[in-house]
Image (cartoon, grey):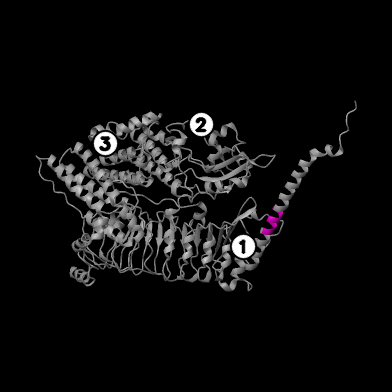
Amino acid sequence: MMAKPVSNSNSHSHLIPLLILILFFSTIFHLSEQLQFSQTQTLQNFQNLLGYPQELLTLNTNTDFCNIEPTPHFTLVCYEENLTQLHVVGNGFSPNALPQNFSSETLFATLATLSSLKVLSLVSLGLWGPIPQTISQLSSLEILNISSNHFSGVVPSQISLLKNLQSLVLDNNLLEGVIPSEIGTLQGLAVLSMKNNSLSGTVPDSVRTLQTLRVLDLSNNKISGDLPSLRHLSNLQDLNLENNKFGPHFPSLPTKLVSLVLKNNSFKLGLPSGLVTFYQLQKLDVSLNGFVGPFLPALLSLPSLNYLDASSNKFTGMLFKNDTCNDELVFVNLSSNLLRGELPTCLKPVVLYAGNCLSNDDGRNQNPASFCSNEAIAVKIMPPQENHKRTTGKTVLVSSMGGIVGGALIVGVVILVVSRVHKKGSVVKTPVKPTLEIVISQAKKEEEDEDKEEEEKETEKEGMVAASSRSLSISVLQRIMKRVPDKGAVESFTRSMKEHVMNRMHNKNGVRTSTRSIIEHASSVNTAKLLTDARYISETMKMGASFPAYRTFALDELKEATNNFDASSFVSEGPHGQIYKGVLSDGMPITIRGLKMRKRHSPQNYMHHIELISKLRHSHLISALGHSFECNQDDSSVSTIFLIFEFVPNKSLRSYVSAGSPSEKLSWTQRILAAIGVVKGIQFLHTGIVPGLYSNNLKITDVLLDNNLNVKISSYNLPLSAETRRLVTNGPYPGLKGNFQERIMDADKNDVYDIGVILLETILGRPLMFHNEVGTLKDLLQVSIKTDDIARRSIVDPAVHKECSNESLMTMMEICVRCLSNDPTERPSVDDVLWNLHFAVQVQNSWRRDSNDQRGSPASSSSHETRVV
């Protein structure tokens, strides 16, 4: 039987998929060529419109513009052959220097054809005319900086259509009119700067909705009226309203401000007493206004403050020689006020104080005391006692302050109970500062600033606040009745209960705080790109800005850096892939983390994750430097993503607190500072990028210290880890963690628990290897808190137990126990932890100075240790 002949059509059927594949790739190649040509043409048109920069004159279709060498005045950045960043900086050209056919509308319409453009910076180019409405066509923009030009007219409302905008910088132009209310729709905006223009009117109420705002600079304009309430903008750190007509009321502000400049405005009333709770404030300038009423000496003790200018106002009140100051103060100006008394000794090296009525060594440049008394009467300053009586007399205030007053009554009852314990002792007279007056005054100010809707919400919470206050006070009472070691306990308890009442007031504002003084330095700001482009941001916010620019690495670069991923370069293999160390051609050491992808996707599918990773740059993180893709040859899908990080050569924190040699162990102050570095790194992961990274599975072995003992977190919840989740979710986490599913809810409090475990090992000085150890040792800590000092120190690492002050040790133990609470809702916030750690350092340094003074020896190690992180 003869076989059937194979048909001709079937004989070529296997070629059809190959032909389709060839057609597909040829189409892709053709589209790529079209894209390259289109972008080249746009850049040529851009150069023709400006006659600048010179680097674009030689550009043609055969030029790879993505590889043009960057210069200080011209930079192009590409990704996957798409132009994503365009930076052009001129020399302050005049408008007449531009070609005659220049048109701002044509300029932005031309740039709108760059569909992938995310960063546009056109600075000092002499650009003129109105900002055109066509700017809204640049829909992919994240950063827009057109400062130091000659743009005029109003700020177009169409700018609000740039929904991805994170940074808007319009400084040093000729803009006028009002700020458009539509600006409030830019819900991702982190930086808004319009300084040095001629803007007028009032700030729109919609600004209060910009929850991600970190920097607001409206200085040197003609804006007037009261600022809308900004107290709910919890991310706001830098507010500059200098040289406007704001006033007369002091603005309602969030307590986490780092820099506040209100210089030369029309503020006429007093400073709110709540300003003394701005523990992160580093710069405060309220000079050249009409502020009246008592100056707040407590401002001088704000733990982060280094610059204070309150000159040229009408502040009254007494200063005393023994008033305390923050050691970090480098400039204080109290000139031209109505202050009396004696200049505090701690201020003399840094203060300007002419034009007051202070008694000093020579009396020069001071007015007689009668002058300040007469002037104070002339401006009708109400005595503090009258103001207090008037405040407490208002029914609405009494109603809203029920929880606080209840707390104050409990203070009195508890003090009475404790006093009776000391029947044989004499009555202890404790000087009472008017803290309740401050609380009530602050509450009054906030009541005036809240709108009707907020007042209704606060009313609903009254019962809850009062109940919470009673519960906390009873708990404190039980603890103090077990401890009462001597007569001094009454004084100590009185002070702590007053602080408790103060902090109940802070809880009313939505911030969970402990019963201790708090201090915190600036949090990090948003992306590395923002740090690069928004150059006006204060130095205190440029965390991570010293790193090289984030970039795409060629795979060959990584092979060269690791000797083709040789075994000698291999470091370890963890839940997030293999880790290698290498050295780039310029000698820079790096760490490379290779992530194997389970699913096949094109590089473009990972770009959202890559953008987020590019923002992971902070002084307390092992920061990202770049990435590289390794693709499958058959379909160009990504098989491995290599993430490149900075390299830290030193050991983990465990080596310095619990597992290393005694000679390498950190001192008590250094341990607290290391913990502060850890918490700041976690704080940045939660709030410094959008969206935040939570449940970071942090272990003490993930915390590295570099050669200068700066803390660096080396492992955290990378956005790409979901792709490799099978590597980490089967069974419990290594070390001290529970099941992965149990860590999904209360993600931020999971990190707080991990911080507690690190604090526990830091205090005890012994490695914690098993989960059940944590619960047992936490209970031991909890019991020791209620015992005497000797018993408490007996469980502390012997290397440091003699050098820590009792109050510092108690603070560390208490916050550690709270972090390890079994109920996530009872754990403190990251901010609360940070505040307590700063307080622990503060009281430790104060105790050490006092001890050295008693011994007559200088505190030589203090300045070094406070710079460890």
Residue indicated by mark 3:
785
Q: Is residue 496 left or right of residue 92?
A: left
Q: Position of residue 568 (x, y in %)?
A: 57, 32
Q: Is residue 839 above or below residue 446?
A: above
Q: Position of residue 388 (x, y in %)?
A: 21, 60
Of mark 2 and mark 3, the one earlier in the sequence is 2
Q: Is residue 160 above or below residue 753?
A: below
Displayed quadrant of residue 567: top right
SS of the residue at dot 2?
Answer: loop
Question: Can residue 359 be seen at all in this image of the molecule?
Answer: no
Of mark 2 and mark 1, the one earlier in the sequence is 1
Residue indicated by mark 1:
111
Residue indicated by mark 2:
730
SS of the residue at dot 3?
Answer: helix
Q: Position of residue 644 (x, y in %)?
A: 55, 42
Which residues lie in the magenta part? 32-38
| Amino acid type of the residue tagged 1 in the rendering | Leu
| Closer to the eye: label 2 or 1 | 2
| Amino acid type of the residue tagged 3 in the rendering | Ile
SS of the residue at dot 1?
Answer: helix
- The disc placed on residue 856 is none
Q: CA distance from mark 2 to mark 3?
A: 38 Å
